[in-house]
Image: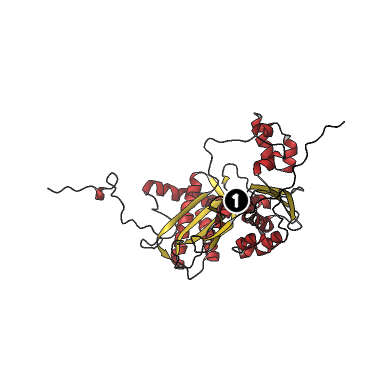
């Protein structure tokens, strides 16, 4: 007789998430979990957090663009919540992936939201309304098990309702030992090559190169302003300085950037003022560490996100998709621009050398206004007794 299989766990209802709707830092209603005493997201910066942590940190735009495989691109997360991460991933996929690509989303949730609460939560993001409607139209009842949602012709969502560890146990993975002994090739076909490498590493087979002094994968330069401003010239100047500083850091680690992210923030603590927290990712014309195209691209991004009538309190530039300059392969189409590229490299090297020898910011692009509102206020700065002659202590007899 064939061996008897363990019966599947019986279908059982799950408790719905209990929500309180509270005002967030921007004065908007945001969903708050009674079970965990925490917000699902802030309407003020929840979307920006998703873009930073979920999309950009995982380099999804770049990976989607390069996905030409016949099998779907698989994204898994624990804790579906309001689905903001998955909807943003879907939007990113539609924006960047080839038409032939497919996306398979997998998520777990122990306390699924009710349909009305989910609909109310997702109204915070009007640009995701069509995708939210597709999700809501198929939103399942809170029944333990796997619910497959066909969001569109290219995107599938598998919702595993129940405890995360319990759902993974159904795959036979209860601990690291189970993962070590799992079939690496099978899990690669259903998940990713990263999981296969993890299994091999657990078996003592080195297949992921580690560097002792690993270069940063992104470079961020941002500052809170000395006082709020909405003037275009001040914001343009601030973004230009931040982009220039980021490019200097990039050259220091001998890297090249393929894209950059520019953002603005109003003062979230000023409930009497309108709030605006825009951000935009823009590809650079080609991988570069030259300050000139980086500054120009950052300012073009600023022009697209700036809105008059707001008082901004912070701005920043982040360089993304960084490459090692020593291992970057030039395109054959770049040959005609080789002379200009070498001239740019010499110019940047000269600029960096002069700033090291003569002091930081001795030479740069654009002369910043010393009284600009974006500059930090230093009224309470301690005296630099050990490095500045004019700030030495004075003793009077």
Name the residue beneath numbered marker 1: 54
Secondary element at image label 1? helix
Toward the right, the furthest residue is 1
Depth check: give the residue in front, 348 or 101.
101
Q: Which residue occupies 50% across, 60% down?
A: 24
Q: How many marks?
A: 1
Depth check: give the residue in front, 272 or 363.
272
Depth check: give the residue in front, 281 or 87.
87
Question: In terms of image quadrants, where is residue 152?
Answer: bottom right
Q: Which residue occupies 50% across, 51% down?
A: 220
Q: Which residue occupies 67% across, 41% down?
A: 166
Pointer 1: residues within 10 angstroms few (<14), some, or many (20+)? some
Toward the left, the furthest residue is 397
Where residue 210 appears, as percent x and y from the top left, is 58, 35
Where residue 348 appears, as percent x and y from the top left, is 48, 50
Q: Do we see residue 101 in this rendering?
A: no
Toward the top, the furthest residue is 204
Q: Do we see residue 79 in this rendering?
A: yes
């Amino acid at each position: 007789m064939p061996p008897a299989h363990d019966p599947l766990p019986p279908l059982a209802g799950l408790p719905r998430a209990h929500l309180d709707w509270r005002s967030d830092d921007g004065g908007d209603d945001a969903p708050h979990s009674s079970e965990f005493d925490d917000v699902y997201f802030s309407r003020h910066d929840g979307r920006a957090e998703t873009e930073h942590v979920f999309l950009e940190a995982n380099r999804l735009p770049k990976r989607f663009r390069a996905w030409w495989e016949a099998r779907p691109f698989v994204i898994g997360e624990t804790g579906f919540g309001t689905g903001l991460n998955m909807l943003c991933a879907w939007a990113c996929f539609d924006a960047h992936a080839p038409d032939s690509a497919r996306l398979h989303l997998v998520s777990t949730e122990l306390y699924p939201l009710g349909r009305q609460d989910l609909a109310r939560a997702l109204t915070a993001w009007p640009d995701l309304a069509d995708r939210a409607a597709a999700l809501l139209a198929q939103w399942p009842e809170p029944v333990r098990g796997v619910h497959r949602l066909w969001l569109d012709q290219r995107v599938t969502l598998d919702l595993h309702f129940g405890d995360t560890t319990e759902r993974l146990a159904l795959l036979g993975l209860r601990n690291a030992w189970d993962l070590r002994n799992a079939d690496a090739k099978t899990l690669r076909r259903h998940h990713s090559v990263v999981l296969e490498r993890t299994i091999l590493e657990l078996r003592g087979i080195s297949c992921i190169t580690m560097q002792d002094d690993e270069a940063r994968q992104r470079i961020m330069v941002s500052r809170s302003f000395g006082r709020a401003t909405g003037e275009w010239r001040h914001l343009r100047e601030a973004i230009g300085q931040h982009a220039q500083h980021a490019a200097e850091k990039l050259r220091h680690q001998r890297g090249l950037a393929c894209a950059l992210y520019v953002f603005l923030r109003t003062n979230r603590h000023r409930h009497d003022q309108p709030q605006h927290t825009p951000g935009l990712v823009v590809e650079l014309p080609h991988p570069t560490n030259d300050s000139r195209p980086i500054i120009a691209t950052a300012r073009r991004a600023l022009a697209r996100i700036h809105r008059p009538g707001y008082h901004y309190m912070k701005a920043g530039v982040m360089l993304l998709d960084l490459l090692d300059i020593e291992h970057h392969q030039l395109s054959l189409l770049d040959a005609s621009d080789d002379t200009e590229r070498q001239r740019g490299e010499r110019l940047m090297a000269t600029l960096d050398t002069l700033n090291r020898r003569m002091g930081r910011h001795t030479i740069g692009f654009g002369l910043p206004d010393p009284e600009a509102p974006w500059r930090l206020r230093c009224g309470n700065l301690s005296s630099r007794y050990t490095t500045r002659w004019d700030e030495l202590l004075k003793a009077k007899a």
